[in-house]
Amino acid sequence: MELFINCKNCREDFKVDSSAITRGELEDELGRYFRMQCSECLSFQEYHVNNVRARVNMRQILIFGAAMAVLAIVLTLIFLSAGLIASLSIVLPIIAFSYFYQSKSASANQFNRMLIKRDRKE
């Protein structure tokens, strides 16, 4: 999952360097309101943690998918004459990939659904 903000000045998305998996963790790390510099137009703006959005990290998905494809090919070549086992060697990596993608997508959706109150903490 990668976090990003839409710049208030140039309207381009830029990445937030954080490993937080919930808005609560992000608030603990950056504060409810924080200043951040856009990587596109280099302007500093103040943002609320609700301005941060999450999306699936496609690079991570592609790497895992490629690994599962290689695994499926290798297992199929090894068990080519085994019939049912050869079929499972194709199906199991596909199931693993779909589970991995679904879990990553669900965590990004959960992050985006959870919001923090907009009042300022004293």
Image: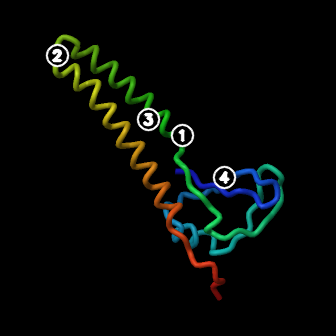
Residue 87 percent location from the top left of the image: 23, 22
C-alpha span from label 4 to label 2: 47 Å
Residue 64 badge: 3
The 10 Å Cα crowd at callout 3, few under 14, some 14 to 19, many 20 or more, is some
Disc 4 is placed on an element classified as strand
Residue at the location (41% across, 29% down)?
Answer: 67
Q: In the rendered structure, which disc, 3 or 2, sits on the residue that comes first in sequence?
A: 3
Asked which secondary structure carries label 1, the reply is helix
Q: Which residue is mark 2?
A: 83
Secondary structure state at the residue bearing disc 2: loop
In the displayed structure image, the side of residue 37 where residue 90 appears, left or right: left
Number of other residues with Cα within 10 Å of mark 2, as a class: few under 14, some 14 to 19, many 20 or more: few
Q: Nearer the viewer, residue 102 or 42?
A: 102
Q: Look at label 3 and name its amino acid.
A: Phe
Disc 4 marks which residue?
15
Q: Residue at x 77, y 56 (%)?
A: 38
**Of the numbered discs in the image, which one, if any, rests on residue 58?**
1
| Among the two numbered marks 3 and 1 on one chain, the one whose residue lies closer to the N terminus | 1
Q: CA distance from mark 3 to mark 4?
A: 22 Å
